[in-house]
Image: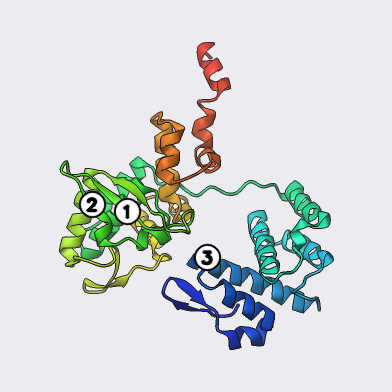
Amino acid sequence: MLASETTGNFVSFPDIEYAATAGDQLAACYESARGAFSYNTERALRADVEIFTFWCRQHVLETVPASVATVVAFIDHMARVKAPSTVRRYVSSIATLHKALGQTNPLESAPVRFALQRMHRRRGRRQAQVQGLTWPLRNRLLEAAGDRLIDLRNRALLAVAYDTLLRRSELVSLQVSDLLEDVDGSATLLVRSGKTDPDRRGAMLYLARDTVRLVRRWLEAGGIAEGFLFRSVRKGGVVRGKLDPSQVPRIYKRMARRAGLPGDIVDSLAGHSTRVGPVQDMIACGIEMPAILQSGRWKTTRMVQRYGERLLARRSGAAQLAARQKR
C-alpha cells in the first residue's frame, strides 16, 4: 500500500505519485475530494481504492469504470478472506469513487447487490463487539495509574472520553479553550466538529466534577494554558504537540495492563470502548433513550441497541413476562 503524507487534519494525495500507480483519473478524484471528508474517511477511501486497484491489476481488469462483473468477482474473492463489514466498506469506497468521477455506480446493479447478499448469507452481518469501558473498569484503570505526568494525562483523557463518548479523533482535537467550568465544579466541553457533524455546528457535552479535577491536574502539571488539551508526552516528562488518534486505544490498553486486567479484555479494548461502556452503564441505570442519543450524538437508536443488546434483552418483554411469572 502506498504511503500517504498528512497535512493538517487531512490526507494529502501527491498527484505524481498516485498518477504513476493508479492513473490520472484517480489522482484527479482524490484532488477534488481533498478536505471534503474527515482525515480517517479520506485515509480509508484511499486505502480501499488502492486495494481494489491492485486486485484489478492482478486480474487484468479495468478499475474505472469497473464493470459489474469485476465488482461481483471482487466481492466474492474478498468475502473469503475479509470480514463482511470490511467488504461492505470496500464496495462503498468503490461506489464513492465512481460517483466522484461521473461514472455509473456499480453498486446500483442487481448482481452487485446479490453478491453482497450472498456474502451475508454465508458469513452473516454480525460484527464483533469491542470491550466496553464501563464504570467499574474506568475506576480500576484510573486507580492503577501512576503519578508521572503521562499518567496524569492518561487519567484525564480516559475520564473525559467516558463522560463525553467522544471518538478518538474528536478527543485529540479538543482545545483548552473548549473547556468551560461551572460554579459547581462541573464543566461543559465544546466539541467543534465530528464524524456526524461535518459542517462544524458543534455540540456541548457534560463533564462531571471528578473529571474536571483530573483535567485541571493534568493541565497544571503539564504547564498547558492554551492549544490542544491532550498532548504527547516524551520520556522525561517533556510535553510535545497534539496527541495522535492512534495512541488513544494504546493508552487504554497500557492502563489496563497496569491494572492487571486479563489479556483477553486488554486485547478487546479499542478507541470505541469509551463509547460502548457508558452506553451500557446508561442502559443499566434506566436512563431513557433520548438522553442516551444526545450523549452520543446519534440520530437513530441503531448503535445504542447494538452496544447494549445484552442489557436490552434483559429488559425485553420476554424478560419482564418471566419476572412477573416469577421464573
Measuring from the top left, give residue 195's x and y in whole percent.
48, 57
80, 248: nearer the viewer:
248
Mark closest to the chain's N terminus, 2 or 1? 2
Residue at 69% across / 66% down in the picture?
99
Q: Are marks 2 and 3 in contact (CB under 8 Å)?
A: no
Mark closest to the chain's N terminus, 1 or 3? 3
Dot 2 falls on a residue whose secondary structure is strand
**Horizontal arrangement in the rendering, residue 50 relative to residue 118 (left or right):** left
Q: Which residue is mark 3?
A: 37
Q: Which residue is mark 1?
A: 190
108, 138: nearer the viewer:
108
Image quadrant occupied by the N terminus: bottom right
Determine the CA span between mark 1 and mark 3.
21 Å
Q: Which residue is mark 2?
A: 180
Dot 1 falls on a residue whose secondary structure is strand
Mark closest to the chain's N terminus, 2 or 3? 3
The part of the image, by quadrant, that contains residue 147 is: bottom left
